[in-house]
Image: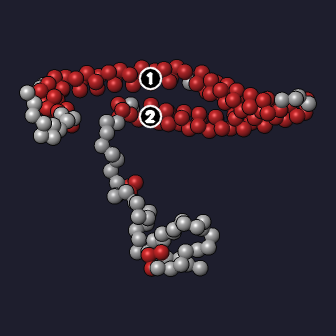
Amino acid sequence: QAFDALEGGAPPRCLPRGVTCVAMKADTPPGGLHAPPGGLSGPPPPYSDPMGVIPAEDRAFLESFGRVLAWMFPTCAAVGGLGCYGMAKHLGWRRVRAWTTFGVIMTPTVGWWAAVMSERERVAAISKRFEAALAQREAEAAAADAGGPSRGSEEDALSRLFPPPPTAGIATT
């Protein structure tokens, strides 16, 4: 049974009392009423991309390494939790939940440590290059700001953002 609140239809019976349902008409654009202009296919938001200073091969490595870590954590948590739960049940230990929690927490930590230690040289080298590139970018920005607007314009901008409170006709002496 179709319901169209925009056409004046009756609300369905499954909703709690006081809750209204708004249905979209057939000519509503995909994504609904709150679709962002341009969608996700539009241009990215204007911001300074810090990853722009990293070479493509380093970016590819970091993305694949991030995927490895993202899959390793939940996998280790599930295997560690199930393993410790099974061991605690099999050996008849009293605090099964505590051992399960221990397995869920410790095995991803060990897995993360093993993954990071296996790639520590490459990650450290990329980190040093990234920090050097960011320091160079900050130095260039500081040099560009030195020739930019004076301090007075910054104070003017702040005074426009935060004007003094209104006096409401009170005479100041």
Q: Position of residue 22 (x, y in %)?
A: 48, 69
- Considering the image in quadrants, where does the N terminus appear? bottom right
Q: Which amino acid lies under the numbered mark 2 shown in the image of this protein?
A: Arg
Label 1 SS: helix
Task: Mark 1: give few (<14), some (14-19) or many (20+) Cα within 10 Å.
Answer: some
Q: Looking at the image, is 28 positioned above or below residue 35?
A: below
User: Toward the viewer: 125 or 40?
Assistant: 40
Where residue 92 sits, quadrant-wise, is top right
Residue occupied by mark 2: 59
Q: Position of residue 114 (x, y in %)?
A: 64, 24
* Drawn side of residue 118 relative to residue 168, left or right: right
- Considering the image in quadrants, where does the C terminus appear? top left
User: Toward the viewer: 17 or 122?
Assistant: 17
Q: Which amino acid lies under the numbered mark 1 shown in the image of this protein?
A: Ser
Residue occupied by mark 1: 127
Say which residue appears at 31% left-offset and 39% top-offset. 47
Q: Looking at the image, is 15 positioned above or below residue 127?
A: below
Q: Which mark is residue 14?
A: none
